[in-house]
Image (cartoon, rainbow, N blue to C red):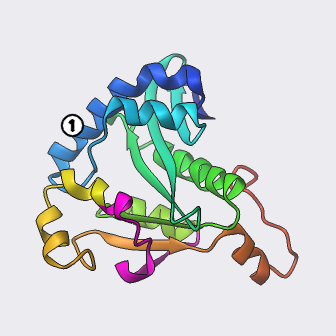
Amino acid sequence: MNIQILQGKKEHAIYAEEICAIIEESAKIRGTGIAKREPSYIRTKFENENAVIALDGDILVGFCYIETFQDKKYVSNSGLIVKPEYREYGIAKKIKYKSFDLAREKYPQARIFGITTSLAVMKINSELGYKPVTFSVLTQDEAFWKGCQSCPNYDILSRNQMKMCLCTGMLAPSKEEAMKYDLTNKIITHEQK
């Protein structure tokens, strides 16, 4: 295996349909929330260079994207997926680290957040400095919560006025906030580790 973890570009948009199919299949298998996305939505992530893709040659291995909310005060890392045959090699962690660095590079003032039911994702998020939080401290942008509508647990979220669900909310400080607490005033990217 020669896996490359890359910032997504326009030329990677050819993988949009396959990404959507993998996300949908994974959601069915897990039976819990992974927001369904349309290929056109995924293509915009590549066009705006707000995605990370893992490739084995020209074979799609995995994917994640970032998206801003509330005038770029918040950025989410979403849609993390790895093809089943490539799991257990640490690829999801590498994709997540790269997307975290991308979010901090492009949006240094934005707090980074996500919601998940995956213990593996929670572990990776914790390594990156995310802390579990209540939904009230996450973005209140309706566009983010609308993405949850395709989840089988959406009724729980809507019944609780978008304040509680089966997912765990996790939040990391912005790059600028993290620098305030870094005595050396230096942020080491996760690629350097």
Q: Position of residue 48 (x, y in %)?
A: 58, 37
Instruction: Please state if 15 lies on the left or on the right of 117 as rendered.
Output: right
Q: Is residue 134 visible?
A: no
Instruction: Please state if 70 lies on the left or on the right of 159 as rendered.
Output: right
Residue range corresponding to the magenta coloring: 129-145
Residue at image location 49% in from the left, 45% down from the top: 65
Q: In which quarter of the view is residue 151 placed? A: bottom left
Callout 1 crowding tier (Cα within 10 Å): few <14, some 14–19, many ≥20: some
Residue at image location 73% in from the left, 56% down from the top: 189
Q: Is residue 99 above or below residue 187?
A: above
Instruction: Please state if 188 lies on the left or on the right of 171 as rendered.
Output: right
Q: Position of residue 123 (x, y in %)?
A: 44, 66
Q: Is residue 29 above or below residue 189?
A: above
Nearest the eye: 192 or 16:
16
Nearest the eye: 24 or 92:
24
- Is residue 9 magenta-colored? no
Residue at image location 56% in from the left, 47% down from the top: 94
Q: Amino acid at mark 1?
A: Glu
Q: Is residue 51 visible?
A: yes
Instruction: Name the residue beneath numbered marker 1.
Output: 25
State which quarter of the image contains the C terminus: bottom right
